[in-house]
């Protein structure tokens, strides 16, 4: 007990009598300037009470004392009384609150003593010495409880202190009966992530549950033979396995954590026993996006290193309470394929509102659970979106991490739009005239790293890829902008650290560097079933050519030589970024070029429809004319003898053989070098007006492109030696060539007297487009033979015919 700064005098026997522990009665006026009487010694200073003031007993500390009624000698040494602030009327149980006070003392208070009690008279107070002017309290109560606070200032240098402040109080209200959050962590660490798993469980235990927040865990260690369910209340690690055993509430047999039934069983157990207003589920283990035989997360070594697919996760959640937030604490899970499997599953009627994950590598230590769990325990009133933001900020700003990212997707708002947007984008890419630029974008888009695959060439940032396309591919700008808008809409939050991820935007997609890298395991996943993205990814371009050259009377050799030189020209071509050449070319010349053989090779060679992205070339040089018997323009194969019209190949027959329904290929290049062959593209006999000549080699012409087979006008690239009413003429100076073949080869920089093409004489940009070679051949043939007009379809095509 303290008795200070009082006037104690004129009492009957004692001014202060004490038969117990020492009492602090310093700084009092005892009725005389020489202090109290009684002859006893001060228990601290030893001074004898030999004054003439009121009498005191033993066990009373009286020194120093006041020498006048106002204690003038001590007045400036006493700290002022602090003023304590009202902490508020009430607060829910488990919530933190702050008690503040102010002190304007000029006498130099060095410390403050704060008392807390549940009784307004402070009968049994808890005392806290604080150097600052605030303190934070948090109480979990079973019944409504008032907590009272008062504070005084003290000067440690002279032992003086102020009187107590006026008290304040706050009502801590009992729980309403249901928690705000239940956070479930499904820790499938039956693999090499077990060690970090125990470390992260320790972080979670350092926070522990409250009546507002439940933390529950299912933990499957490696090779233990058991699986453990925890309700986290702050258990110590312990020396014996399994660790944190005081918080184990159920022990299961060895569990294959990669099975959907195991996941749904855990979630249902947690929501049944620890109900809450909001639920978060964290899947903790290695992640692999959609890829390979895995396509998901949660590797279980004891069960044969199987992994849970994204579809299995969606199926498991279709049998549980609705999850507000689904988190992936594993590598490369923030893919559009994962989001679509979960957000657009017909059986998962209520998918998670939000999905948190990383596009790239995650460190083995996982998320900073002490920070994340601490945040939601301190602020359980956080809504799901705000909790997501806390998680992103905590992970990306966590000390020591670099080149990491984390994002939040709004699964409940935009994922249904993905097929429409991706299909439009895929179609535009397939139909584009800028395939080299697209190939370059595939290679240069932001790529991501994972534990299982290293620097993965398969997973790229969707926004960044669309951004590169938007800047470099003019005929895909609308569709690429729609993709960028989609990503901006569906990504609620995104953050990253490290210069290597400066082009990350929060959502990745499967995008192998080249079509040849396409993995057939991708086929059939939910995203693939509802989009044509894999059509773009897997466009394996195979170049096949059939060269026909013959003369039905067996005399003229020019058609055979033309076909052979054409074959040699195209045999030297290498197309596109990866310099792909013709995989095969058939030279059907002389007496081999009968009608039946030509048809057989078209049907069985060009007619291979297994890959719609193939580029097919058909060249035919022979006699041609008009058959009055058949009333149609015709080509004459080797076995036509001048009378057997059934051996003639009509324009209609050839069109049927080369039609979309008969042969494969996204592009069909047709080069006809015969008299009257313009009938193939102009049966009405009208001349196709020549366009203004362009300077040869002045434009960058794109590589062969894949076109939608539903657009035949984009499918065929045709050039013929002459108009339907004209003849294709031979060079008259003894050269065994036609004018058309001579200038076609010359326009492609092929030296007709020597092969291969001289390297120092190749086109400036290495490419020759259909319009370029048409214009060159048209002009030069016309200068040699004014009645021969080379024909082309379509006009102004920049499709690449030749590339070196």
Image: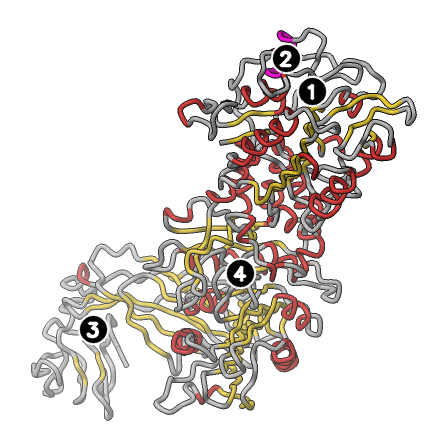
The residue identified by callout 2 is 781
Residue 716 on the magenta span: no
Spot occupied by residue 477 in the image (x, y as percentages of width and height): 61, 32
Point 20% across, 58% down: residue: 107
Spot occupied by residue 353 in the image (x, y as percentages of width and height): 64, 59
Can the viewer see residue 482?
Answer: no
Q: Distance from label 1 to label 2 (Cα)?
A: 9 Å
The residue identified by callout 4 is 333
The residue identified by callout 3 is 28
Tell me, yes or no, whether the two marked residues, 1 and 2, touch with CB atoms within 8 Å.
Answer: yes
Instruction: Please state the extent of the stretch shown in magenta in the rendering.
Output: 775-784
The residue identified by callout 1 is 721
- Which of these two is toward me, 500 or 750? 750
Q: Secondary structure at mark 3?
A: loop
Quarter holding the N terminus is bottom left
Can you tell which of label 4 and label 3 is closer to the viewer?
4
Point 53% across, 84% down: residue: 229
């Amino acid at each position: 007990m303290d008795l200070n700064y009082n006037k104690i005098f004129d009492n009957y026997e004692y001014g202060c009598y004490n038969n117990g522990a020492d009492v602090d009665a310093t700084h009092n006026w005892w009725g005389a300037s020489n202090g109290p009487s009684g002859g006893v010694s001060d228990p601290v200073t030893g001074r004898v009470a030999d004054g003439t003031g009121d009498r005191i007993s033993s066990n009373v500390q009286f020194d120093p004392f006041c020498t006048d009624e106002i204690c003038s000698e001590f007045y400036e040494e006493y700290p002022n009384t602090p003023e304590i602030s009202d902490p508020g009327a009430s607060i829910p149980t488990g919530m933190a609150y702050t008690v503040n006070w102010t002190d304007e003392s000029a006498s130099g208070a060095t410390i403050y003593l704060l008392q807390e009690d549940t009784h307004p008279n402070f009968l049994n107070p808890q005392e806290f010495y604080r150097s600052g002017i605030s303190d934070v309290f948090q109480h979990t109560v079973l019944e409504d409880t008032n907590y009272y606070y008062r504070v005084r200032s003290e000067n440690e240098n002279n032992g003086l202190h102020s009187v107590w402040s006026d008290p304040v109080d706050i009502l801590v209200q009992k729980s309403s009966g249901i928690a705000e959050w239940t956070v479930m962590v499904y820790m499938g660490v039956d693999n090499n992530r077990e060690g970090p798993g125990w470390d992260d469980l320790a972080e979670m235990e350092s926070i522990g549950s409250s009546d507002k927040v439940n933390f529950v865990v299912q933990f499957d260690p490696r090779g233990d033979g058991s699986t453990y369910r925890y309700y986290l209340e702050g258990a110590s690690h312990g020396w014996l396995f399994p660790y944190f055993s005081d918080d184990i509430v159920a022990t299961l047999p060895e569990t294959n954590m990669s099975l959907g039934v195991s996941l749904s069983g855990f979630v249902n157990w947690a929501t049944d026993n620890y109900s809450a207003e909001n639920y978060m589920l964290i899947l903790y283990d290695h992640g692999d996006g959609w890829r390979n035989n895995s396509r998901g997360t949660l590797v279980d070594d004891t069960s044969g290193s199987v992994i849970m697919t994204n579809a299995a996760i969606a199926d498991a959640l279709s049998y549980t309470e609705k999850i507000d937030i689904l988190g992936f604490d594993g590598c490369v899970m923030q893919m559009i394929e994962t989001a679509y499997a979960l957000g657009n599953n017909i059986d998962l009627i209520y998918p998670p509102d939000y999905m948190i994950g990383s596009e790239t590598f995650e460190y083995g230590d996982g998320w900073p659970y002490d920070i994340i769990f601490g945040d939601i325990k301190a602020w359980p009133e956080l809504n799901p979106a705000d909790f997501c933001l806390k998680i992103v900020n905590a992970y990306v700003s966590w000390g020591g991490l670099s080149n990491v990212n984390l994002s939040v997707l709004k699964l409940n708002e935009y994922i249904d739009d993905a097929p429409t947007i991706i299909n439009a984008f895929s179609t535009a890419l397939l139909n584009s005239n800028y395939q080299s630029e697209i190939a370059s974008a595939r290679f240069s888009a932001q790529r991501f790293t994972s534990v299982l695959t290293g620097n993965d060439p398969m997973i790229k940032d969707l926004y960044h890829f669309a951004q590169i396309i938007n800047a470099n591919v003019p005929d895909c700008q609308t569709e690429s902008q729609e993709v960028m808008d989609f990503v901006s809409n569906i990504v609620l939050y995104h953050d990253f650290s490290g210069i290597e991820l400066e082009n990350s935007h929060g959502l990745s997609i499967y995008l192998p560097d080249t079509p040849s890298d396409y993995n057939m395991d991708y086929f059939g996943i939910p995203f693939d079933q509802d989009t044509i993205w894999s059509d773009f990814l897997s466009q394996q371009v195979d170049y096949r050519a059939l060269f026909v050259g013959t003369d039905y009377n067996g005399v003229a050799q020019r058609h055979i030589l033309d076909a052979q030189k054409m074959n040699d020209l195209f045999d030297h071509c290498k197309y596109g970024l990866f310099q792909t050449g013709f995989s095969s070319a058939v030279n059907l010349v002389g007496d081999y070029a009968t009608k039946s053989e030509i048809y057989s090779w078209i049907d069985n060679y060009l007619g291979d429809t297994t890959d719609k992205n193939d580029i097919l070339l058909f060249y035919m040089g022979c006699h041609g004319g008009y058959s009055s018997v058949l009333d149609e323009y015709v080509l004459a194969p080797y076995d036509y003898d001048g009378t057997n019209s059934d051996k003639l190949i009509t324009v209609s027959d050839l069109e049927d053989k080369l039609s979309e329904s008969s042969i494969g290929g996204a592009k069909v290049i047709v080069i006809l070098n015969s008299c009257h062959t313009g009938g193939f593209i102009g049966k009405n006999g009208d001349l196709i007006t020549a366009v203004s000549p362009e300077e040869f080699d002045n434009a960058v012409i794109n590589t062969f492109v894949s076109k939608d087979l539903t657009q035949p006008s984009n499918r065929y690239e045709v050039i013929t030696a002459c108009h339907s009413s004209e003849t294709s003429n031979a060079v008259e100076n003894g050269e065994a060539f036609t004018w058309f073949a001579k200038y076609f080869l010359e326009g492609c920089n092929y030296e007709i007297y020597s092969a291969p093409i001289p390297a120092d004489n190749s086109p400036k940009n290495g490419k020759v487009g259909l319009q370029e070679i048409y214009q060159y051949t048209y002009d030069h043939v016309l200068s040699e033979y004014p009645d021969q007009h080379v024909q082309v379809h379509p006009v102004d095509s920049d499709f690449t015919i030749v590339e070196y």
